[in-house]
Image (cartoon, helix red, strand yellow):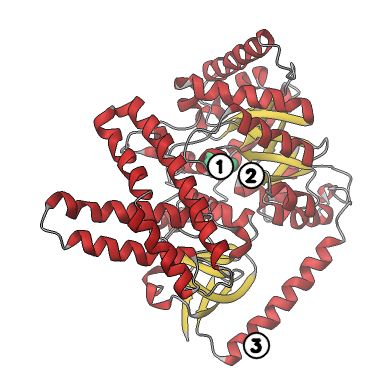
Amino acid sequence: MVVLKGKSVFGDICMGELFFYRRGESVIKRHKIDDADAETARFKKAKEEAKEQLLKLYEKALHEVGEDNAAIFEIHRMMLDDEDYCESVENIIRSQFVNAEYAVGVTADNFAEMFSSMDDAYMQARAADVRDISERIVKILSGADALGSGGLSSPAIIAADDLAPSETVQLDRSKVLGFVMQNGSANSHTAILGRSMGIPSVIGVGEGLSAEHDGKFAIVDGFDGVVYIDPDAETVSKLEQKRRNASRRKELLQELKGKESVTLDGRKIKIYANIGNVSDTVFALQNDAEGIGLFRSEFLYLENDDFPTEEQQFAAYKAAAEKMSGKKVIIRTLDIGADKQAPYFGLDKEENPALGFRAIRICLTRTDIFKTQLRAILRAALYGNISVMFPMIISVDELRRAKSIMEEAKSELRAENIPFKEEVETGIMIETPAAVMISDELAKEADFFSVGTNDLTQYTLAIDRQNQKLEPFYDAHHPAVLKMIEIAANNAHKEGKWIGICGELGADLLLTERFLQMSIDELSVSPSMVLEVRKKVRETDLSKF
Ligand code: PEP
Ligand code: MG
């Protein structure tokens, strides 16, 4: 048995096979099929989709980098129609009764080997192309990036060095039992996603975890931050008991559904949920969240390989608003940059990305992207109770500029006779010390504040939230951060505005009492923490202080 210690991200226990995440290559498993005709049709359909993707890429590249550079996509499209290639795939499916992914993989290996062994340098280079087109088809067939059903056919515990947010969001959640990461910090977006997906996760276990453990049985104890690989019988039974106790506790929490979030002495607070996409509203509702306090809209961008259109965004925001049936849904506008990178934005590499071109800074520069999002939000606001908030604000001027772009979006919609909601509550995130220090002025112009404690802590303590090495210096309860929140709360209330907390600190049960004392109006936490926080609120008696 191997025992690895790390940091807990989400407290629960899971048991299953470890699956080592392989970046950039699809892991193809061979399995038998019954219907070779259906499997061949699957291959042909995927091939057509790949051709469409390549055509789009060709057109985009033609526009952006010229014909010579775009030509490669045209070549790939032609290769997909190569008779020998297609015949090889179909023959393998029909003669061996195997899945299309496997047939494509074998064909790719054979063709690449043949090209590599040729004398002509041009033909040798085609080996990489045949692998590339095959990889594209396998991805389509498996319905995901590196971890589709072709890679991850049954539920498993995902192991990796660390995952980028864009990799995490592409996982098929129904197949993820847990996460174990060699690296990572508790405030990284991967950790946040693990938490919001309610998946037992342990990060920072170090080099003790390696690809050799792929396929081994493991237990993730997200309560104590421990991972057991090849556990002995005694450990299995101990952890099974712990898991039973945890589910009993969860059942007890269910009794709080439908109850008010109110202290023993009558102070009410709203408990909302943080989500990354529309399907998370299901978890929010299952856990009886009173609204959505943070919809991280950038995940719509991370899930796509091109800018999501106004219609795509409108559909997503409308669906979220409708699913929450009248409960508040606060959409945080695009917060891309730093660790949340989407390649098609073409952002430059930066020395200090956390202090760099991100969030509202991108939106105020690329107003076309920003306006598309705002138009979608304004239109969707007709279908529920939508609010909007801007991330990373550092000045009153930024807020005014963002609001004026919103007014432009309204004028456009009006001129085009497209229905939208005129009055949408507009707030800002308080996640920079600058915003705290001028929160008296900002409170005059924003409808509400929502404190992003993850970034506020990073910028106040000068501690990179992504840097695992700094965890010993990271004090989540640092008085400077708590004072910052209190200043912002007082200034919001002086102007009659409400203030919430949507960073991870909002779910810290050791601070619930403190936040109630500061008269924080709302806490937005990962769906799995809603009932825990409600329990804590209902046990608190502020009159004792
Ligand atoms: C925060 O910074 O606290 C926050 C909620 O935003 P994100 O974690 O997405 O940066
Ligand atoms: Mg933030």
Tag of residue 47: none
Q: CA distance from mark 3 to mark 2?
A: 37 Å
Q: CA distance from mark 2 to mark 1?
A: 7 Å
The residue under the point 41% across, 73% down is 209
Q: Position of residue 353 (x, y in %)?
A: 38, 38
- Label 3 vs 2, first from the N-terminus: 3
**Neighbourhood count class around disc 2 (C-alpha, 10 Å): few under 14, some 14–19, many 20 upward:** some
The residue at label 2 has a CB less than 8 Å from ligand 1? no
Q: Is residue 45 left or right of residue 266?
A: left
Residue under label 3, please give it.
Answer: 237
Q: Is residue 238 above or below residue 77?
A: below
Q: Which image quarter: residue 488? A: top right
Q: Secondary structure at mark 1?
A: helix
Near-viewer residue (313 or 252): 313
Three-letter amino acid code at the position of disc 1: Phe
Three-letter amino acid code at the position of disc 3: Ser
Residue under label 1, please give it.
Answer: 299
How many numbered badges does the structure rendering display? 3
Three-letter amino acid code at the position of disc 2: Asn
Q: Secondary structure at mark 3?
A: helix
Q: Position of residue 185 (x, y in %)?
A: 47, 56
Tag of residue 277: 2
Q: Nearer the viewer, mark 3 or mark 2?
A: 2
Q: Do labels 2 and 1 touch, CB within 8 Å? A: yes
Q: Is residue 528 above or below residue 76?
A: below
- Label 1 vs 3, first from the N-terminus: 3
The residue under the point 48% across, 39% down is 460
Q: Position of residue 434 (x, y in %)?
A: 50, 28
Near-viewer residue (294 or 498): 294
